[in-house]
Image: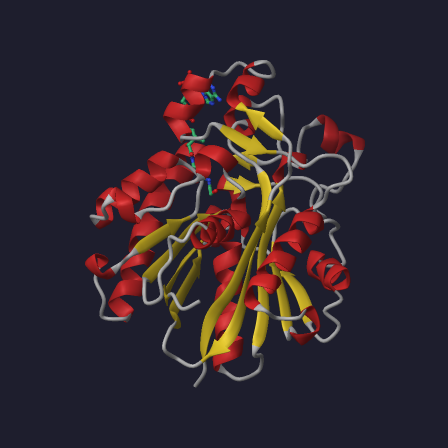
């Protein structure tokens, strides 16, 4: 059986930066509140003519270049997003066209902030089964277009960007050890976009009722996130007969500094083993882990043989973990 290995990473974010001080001029908030309650200082916001596929394509090109893989060698393109360019066709098909990845089957998956890990899980299974040998997994969002910029409860939290990973069949010395993914639809109303699907199609009323924007019960999501992310981290370690002490780097979904700190504390992880960059990006949903991975990789933080864990939680509800032995 082949083991799936990440051979290239890439990321891309819009140039435009929106700081907490900029937000102070838009809603009743303060830099102090946002930093204390979330850890976020600034986020990148897409400009005119920039779409979810724009950042996905850029991130993918960088990951392919690092991996030394040509686009037309790809078997699969999996794009995780809740902010696709269009309801259909998939953003993955647009990325396929941009890259000229002519051989690949391309499709989107919707698992909110856990989407990149759900995509990695699919890539891992496809490679292990022998049905694919080169897979591109992308997490990409332009959340700024579904954020209500008059709602201080949500507008301070989110940002735009994309991260990508090339996953290939490896020789088994490193690579993905396990993936664990979960969902609980009984909580779907805690975090969702009420409008623009077919329950509340795009109409003047949908717009007037502000249904086109993200709706979130932050406090409930917070508590469930901490619990689920801790559990799924242990699930991964137990399945591989490993312990927290074996981990070299923990890369969690970047939603809130307090969530990350709470999980780190519950797991007994030293802060030097937890990767955090949300102060510069905010919550980029499915893009947060691959952007963080790419930063860790390009800054030389990852050494061959390091044990890495990705851990995510998001709307659906969905959550999951991926444990891997780094081998570049
Ligand atoms: O991506 C995956 C899923 N998402 C998450 O994981 C997000 C999880 N949730 C969170 O990160 C946090 O719950 C939030 C950051 C969203 C909110 O933090 P909180 O500590 O749970 O605050 P809260 O919602 O309980 O609000 C506390 C107070 C409220 O005022 P009152 O009702 O107590 O008077 C809010 O109106 O803070 C107020 N508030 C703000 N004040 C200034 C909420 N947003 C702001 C703001 N500026 N931006």
Q: Quadrant of the N terminus?
A: bottom left
Q: Which sits in the foreground, 246 or 296?
A: 296
- In the image, residue 325 sits, relative to residue 262, either above or below, namely below
Residue at 57% x, 82% y: name it: 131
Q: Position of residue 257 (x, y in %)?
A: 37, 35
Q: Position of residue 14 (x, y in %)?
A: 64, 39
Q: How many marks?
A: 0
Judged from the image, the quadrant occupied by ligand 1 is top left
Tell me which colouring the rendered structure shows. Answer: secondary structure
Can the viewer see residue 282 in this picture? no
Q: Specify whether 157 is left or right of 235.
A: right
Q: Which sits in the foreground, 166 or 190?
A: 166
Q: Specify whether 313 is left or right of 286.
A: left
Q: Which sits in the foreground, 57 or 297?
A: 297
Can the viewer see residue 175 in this picture? yes
Q: Specify whether 160 is left or right of 230.
A: right
Residue at 39% x, 54% y: name it: 311
């Amino acid at each position: 059986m082949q083991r799936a290995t990440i051979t290239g990473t890439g990321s891309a974010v819009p140039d435009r930066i929106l700081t907490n001080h900029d937000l102070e001029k838009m809603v009743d908030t303060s830099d102090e509140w946002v930093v204390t309650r979330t850890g976020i200082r600034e986020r990148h916001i897409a400009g005119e003519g920039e779409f979810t596929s724009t950042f996905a394509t850029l991130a993918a090109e960088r990951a392919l270049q690092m991996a030394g893989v040509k686009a037309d060698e790809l078997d699969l393109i999996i794009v995780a997003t809740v902010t696709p360019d269009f309801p259909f066709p998939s953003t993955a098909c647009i990325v396929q066209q941009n890259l000229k990845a002519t051989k690949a089957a391309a499709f989107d998956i919707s698992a909110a902030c856990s989407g990149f890990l759900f995509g990695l899980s699919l890539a891992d299974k496809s490679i292990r089964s022998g049905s694919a040998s080169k897979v591109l997994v992308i997490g990409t969002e332009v959340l700024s277009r579904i954020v209500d910029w008059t709602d201080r409860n949500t507008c301070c939290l989110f940002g735009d960007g994309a991260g990508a990973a090339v996953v290939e069949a490896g020789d088994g010395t490193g690579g993905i050890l396990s993936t664990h993914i979960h969902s609980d639809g009984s909580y779907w109303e805690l975090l969702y976009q009420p409008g623009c699907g077919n329950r509340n199609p795009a109409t003047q009323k949908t717009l007037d009722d502000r249904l086109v924007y993200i709706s979130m019960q932050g406090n409930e999501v917070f508590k469930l996130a901490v619990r689920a992310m801790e559990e799924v981290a242990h699930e991964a370690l137990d399945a591989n007969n490993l312990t927290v002490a074996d981990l070299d780097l923990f890369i969690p979904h970047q939603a809130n500094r307090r969530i990350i700190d709470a999980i780190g504390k519950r797991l007994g992880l030293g802060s030097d083993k937890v990767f955090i960059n949300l102060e510069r990006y905010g919550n980029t949903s499915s893009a947060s882990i691959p952007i963080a991975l790419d930063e860790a990789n390009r800054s030389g933080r990852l050494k061959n043989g390091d044990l890495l864990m990705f851990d995510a939680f998001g709307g659906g509800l969905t959550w999951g973990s991926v444990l891997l032995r780094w081998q570049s």
